[in-house]
Every structure is written in C-alpha cells, then in structure tokens.
Image (cartoon, rainbow, N blue to C red):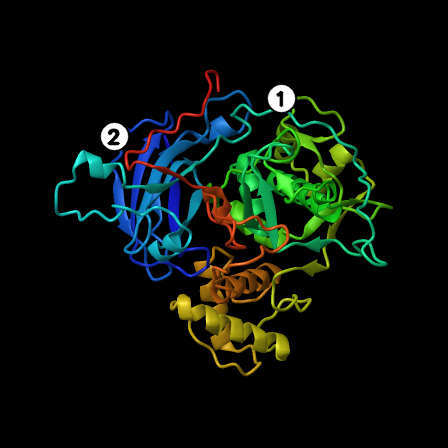
Amino acid sequence: MALGQLRVVVFQNDSSVPLPNSRVTITPLGQNNQEETEATVVITTNEQGQTETIDLTAPPIEYSQAPNQPVPYSFANIRVEAEGFIPTTINGVQIFPSLTALQNVNMVSNEVAAARGIDRVQINIPKHRLVEESEKKYRQDIVVNIQANTLVGIFPPKIPEAEEKPLPPAKSTVVLENVVVPEFIIVHTGVPDDNSAQNYTVGYKDYIKNVACCEIFSTWPESAIRANLYCIISFTLNRVYTEWYRSRGKNFTITNSTAFDQAFSPGRNIYDNIDRIVDEIFSTYIKRQGTKQPLFAQYCDGVRVSCPGWLTQWGSKNLADQGRTPYEILTNFYGTNIDLVRAPEVEGVPESYPGRTLSIGDTGTSVRSLQTYLNRISDNYPLIPKVPVDGEYGPSTEEAVRVFQQVFNLPETGRTDYATWYEISQIYVGVTKIAELRVGNEIEGFKSYEASYGQSNFTRRVFYPPTTYEKVNIPKVNYMDDGY
C-alpha cells in the first residue's frame, strides 16, 4: 500500500477565524471503508486551527490512472470537538496516495446554535459520569457524509444543452457587460425543480475546488487537472453570466445534479494540488472566439458515458500522459476557435489585483493595502508577523507574505502574485466579516442555512457544511455499488 496525507483545519462558525485547541479524532478505514489495523489518531489544532499532517495508507496510484480499477482512495472518519461548540463528524474523507487531503471544518458554537433554535438539550454531558441511555439520545453531532467521486460512483449522465445560451433580460441599458467572478455560488442540492432540496451558499473558489475533487482524480497529471478545471470554471461562469436559473424564477446559481450541472458534495475534503491550482486560475475561463459568454463547457467521463464534441475526462488524462498542454487538450475536444480569458472583476474583495506581482522594492497604495490586510489577518493567525504600514515592500513584508503562503498552502515565494493577492483578500474578508445573525429580510438569492431547521428569519452568506443530527455512534459510509 502507498501513503497519503491528511490535515484538518478548524474554523469558528462561518468565518475564517481559526479554532485552536480543538480535539480531532481520525479513524482510518482503509480502501474497503472498514476499520482496519491502523490506530485511531487523536491530535489537537494549533494557533492556526490546523492539525499536523499525518500519514494514512492509500491504494496504489495505478488504481487512479485508468478506468475500471478498484476504488483508488482509502477512507477516514473525522470527529472534531471543542469547548463551547457542537461536535462535528465527517464521514468518508477520501485519501489518495502522494497527496495531502485538506479537510476544513466550520464548527457551530453553542451560542450560534441557540440563536438558530437548534435543540442542544444534554449535548454537553459531563465526561466524568455515567450516562443513562435516555440521555444518550440527546447527544448530537453535526454530521457530513462525503459522496463518491463521479468516476467511481453511480450518477446520472448529463443532459445535453445548447452551447450558446440566451442572455437574461436587460437591466436598465446594460446586459452583464463583463463576466464577473461572483463572491458566492448558491448550490441547489437536487434537480432544478425539486423544491424540497436544500440550497447551500459557498465561496466561489471553494465551490470550484469541491467540484474538481468530486469530478476527477487529483492524482492525474497537472495538465489534465488544469484542462478539467478550465471546463468547470467556464461551465460555472456561464451559469452565472446567463443567470440561467435565476431567469427561470429559481433562487440558486447551479445544482449539484450531474444530469444538469456538476457534482458538488457539501463539506467534502479537497487536495493540496487542487487547492493551489484553483488559487492560480480561478478567474480564467474558456471563450469561443466571436462570442461574449463563457463557453458552456459540457463534459463526461468518456468511458461509461459517450459525449461527442465534449471534453471527456479520461480522454483528457490520456492526452496529458502524451505531453499535451491544457490548451491543446481543450482544443482537441472543443475546436481551435477558443481562447482562455481572465475575468476582469472579482466580487467580494476590498481591492482588485494591482496588475503585476508585488515584490521587494515595490511601493505605493497597493503595498500599503497589502500590509493592512496582513496585519489584520495576523490578529487571528499570530504566526504571521506584523509589518509597518508604510507602503514599502521590504524584507518584513516579504517575510509576512511568505508565512501567509506557508499557512494557506501557496508556493512560499514571499512575492504577492495573483493567487496570493486574492487569497490574502479572501482571508481578510473572512476574518473581518464575521457573520452576524440578523432578523429581517434575507439578501436576495441567499437562502439561509437556518431554513433547513424551519427558521427562515436569519440570514447568512458563508457556507456551513450540510448537517443532519444523529446519535454519537455514526454509521459507516457505504456508497459504493458492486463492481466499482
């Protein structure tokens, strides 16, 4: 067996504020999703809310390099406990060989749970005394069950749609002049007309990372990963640009039904390489020459489902094995009259990218803004050193950027490139815009997390994993059908 790695990162409620001193219990389950001889690991998060990276057994990498192989990842269950917060269990974390699985956990505090009307009776039973069976039923975890990767699970094939979409009605005199990267994606967890399905609000980059980890194997060559990410990004931005569901009276951006859109498993783990690549290219999409909207880049696996004219996931992997670049892979499927274009606007950040990489010797307002953001972030991530806000990119600013990159899984260059700028911006927003519970009207298009508990009078804008309330003894995940 090979080895993969796992690191857990714990946050307070729906913010980017870390939760140190959380107790994290990791139970390895092996490739067959059964408890094996590997011992359960109990570790504690540091000041950054992170656990140490631990090694776990994983299947041979060959299982993920060709179709119709055994399941190419092993499993682990995670339980996180922290004083003043509801325990959270993640079932079915997927461990690939030679990659680090990153599992983010947003813990719900008792205070927030009470404000949201979640029954907390007997949730904090003292550990030092015996618990009667009648009391045990009240001990509840927030539970996230991770679904299968689409290349091994059973999912409905995509229903073909026209590549060129009609645009929504004009708003005043302009119809979506530019493609804009949204701050959030609202995902409907069902087919479009299933009114009983829940909506989840998730940060745009987090959504792209989640979909990629659901749709492809992260052990593939980087050219294949990038080509598939361009498709995922372009598909998503087409739904945003054309207001496909909103113009039909829906209150969401996209669904997680593979028949209509892309797979999305709320609360699932991602991988360090996917994390890094998405941070680099999250705003770059495919555009057919002569058109305005992002290409509606439909795709399929190409083995169990045939889709002429679309990208096939296994086909992209085979082309990458031959040394093809991401653009060459895309033109092989969509034709040569396509371009890769970067969206000019990213919503939800305090200041746009200055247009060039910032490094030693640079000066000006962009450097001053960068220093301000880093100093605020360091209040919650004390490993990042404070810097003078003087508008000069000197050694202290370079070191603060380098430590930030280390903490947030970016290449440790000390230079503020496109990926680093927007990650700093996103974390700055995440630690300053601590979610507030507000009574009144919801922001248009943002169905509240609390609505799933029958309380629609609260508004929130940042993603929590989907939750079900169960007893502490959580059943094993078993989503694989025979033959996969």
User: Which sits earlier in the primary sequence, circle 1 or circle 2?
Assistant: 2
Secondary-structure class at tag 2: loop
Q: Of all residues shown, which one is farthest toward the top?
A: 482
- What is the distance, in whole Å, between disc 1 and disc 2 at their CAs? 35 Å
Towards the viewer: 188 or 325: 188
Q: Is residue 384 visible?
A: no
Q: Residues within 10 Å of mark 1 (few under 14, many from 20)?
A: some
Q: Position of residue 370 (x, y in %)?
A: 56, 72
Q: Residues within 10 Å of mark 2 (few under 14, many from 20)?
A: few
Q: Position of residue 81 (x, y in %)?
A: 29, 49
Numbered mark located on residue 303 in the image: 1
Towards the viewer: 457 or 420: 457
Q: Position of residue 33 (x, y in %)?
A: 36, 27
Above or below: residue 206 compared with residue 330: below
Q: Which residue is mark 2?
A: 37
Q: Residue type at mark 1: give it.
A: Val
